[in-house]
Amino acid sequence: MEVVQEKLHRMKDLYDWSLSIADDRVKDWPLMSSPLPTLGLMAVYLTMVKVGPRVMQHRPPFQLRIPLIVYNLAIMLLNLYIGVELAIVSVRLRYSWFCQPVDYSTNPDEMRIAAALWWYYISKLVEFTDTLFFILRKKTNQLTFLHIYHHSTMFCLWWIGIKWVAGGSSFLAAMMNSFVHVVMYAYYGLSAFGPAVQKYLWWKKHITCIQLIQFTSAGVLGARAIVVGCDFPLWMQYALVVYMSSFIILFGQFYVQHYRLKQKKMKGSKNGTAGHQGGANGITHNGVASAKQHMANGVVRQDGQVLLIMCVVCAAQLTISTIHIGSRKIWEGGRRRGARGMLAALSLSKRTETRESDTFYKIGESATNHAGHHTEETRRRDELLTRPQRSEDVCVNLNN
């Protein structure tokens, strides 16, 4: 128990020390005195993500066309203000894009930078409404890991940024992201007008490209500051590089799945339509060769008649093992015994017993039914009947 209490005291000391080195200029601003409000709002957001779709499961989706237009316009204007404010003041203060230390003074321009960054942090809270609209409209397919990760972490991490480094090199990431969001929310607002306007919004995928350029630029500049050296908190530079790397991976995966792979599938489907017309060219139609084309080329003619004749011949050779007239054989194993043998058999049939007084033909009997008549031809017939059927054995089926 004492060990636990000691660790808790150490954690409290660390927390107090971290607050002691925080930016005093922002400590009395809304939500900045303690991390608890920010953590609580994030917990509410994650609860909404979990519970919201279940609440809407058996309810019809809301049609929020007007609220969407108003909301996206408001967020676009807020980001436009933040981006322009940071751009104007940073130029006036001659901020460097590569390395800019934090000025903790109460200089009016520095305070404007800090205030613009605080509004940027607040905009991340307002953007939780994106997720709320998805839930109310039952667009749950858009509640991806990327969406939830982006919205929840941005809000928390920028609280840290404003609390300790409300100025300096922090301005660049916020300024770039604000201008990107102006374009993004302009697209969302216009798309809310419906199909009449959506058909002109061809530049959706380019928004993702712009975001990837933004993340890559911020990550490269942060890595450069680490390597070259910069009078800006090193822990913030490392956090920036790691965070931007995660966005590059997630947004890059999103771009590949939603744009590059779809383009390949569309091209493949267009190329595949020619395959359905292959039957007309005599190649294939659903994997079956075009018989009409083969006949036109003279490869196969009178298919049915030729096949029937061949099967009749096969049946005669394979099925008729022995033909008896009386007690004399005139056909044995497919070999004719000759005209003389036939005449002799006919003359001898008159002297047979009364049970055999009538001439009869035993056609179709296998030689295996008569002892001593297992000839080479009958064995061939048995093999043909028992082995797996091939195309040349098709005639056997006529006798079954």
Image (cartoon, helix red, strand yellow):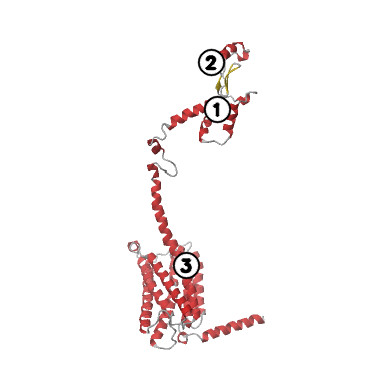
The image position of residue 291, as x and y in percent, is 41, 38
Task: Estimate the spatial distance between the alpha carbons at disc 2 and disc 1, rounded to whole Å.
Answer: 22 Å
* 27 with respect to 366 (left or right): left
Q: Is residue 283 above or below residue 68?
A: above
- Real-space CA distance between mark 1 and mark 3, rounded to the nearest whole angstrom: 71 Å
Task: State the SS at label 2.
Answer: helix
Q: In the current view of this chain or complex, which residue is farthest to the right?
A: 1
Question: Mark 2–mark 1 contact, CB under 8 Å?
Answer: no
- Residue 336 is labelled as none
Judging depth in this view, the residue of 156 and 294 nearest the camera is 294
Tell me which residue sits at (37%, 79%) in the image: 87
Tell me, yes or no, whether the two marked residues, 2 and 3, touch with CB atoms within 8 Å. Answer: no
Circle number at residue 339: 2
Relative to 340, 98 lies left or right: left
Q: Which residue position is annotated with label 3? A: 250
First in sequence: mark 2 vs mark 3: 3
Instruction: Please state which amino acid type lies under the numbered disc 2.
Output: Ala
Q: Residues within 10 Å of mark 2 (few under 14, many from 20)?
A: few
Q: From the top left corner, tell me how far across and down residue 140 is, in percent.
A: 46, 63
Q: Which residue is mark 1?
A: 318
Query: Crowding at label 1, few (<14), some or many (≥20) Cα neighbours within 10 Å?
Result: many
Which x, y percent locates residue 359?
57, 15
The image quadrant where one finds the C terminus is top right
Q: Callout 3, which amino acid? A: Leu
- Tell me the CA gap for discs 2 and 3: 92 Å
Q: Secondary structure at mark 3?
A: helix
Where does residue 138 sit, x and y in percent of width and height? 45, 63
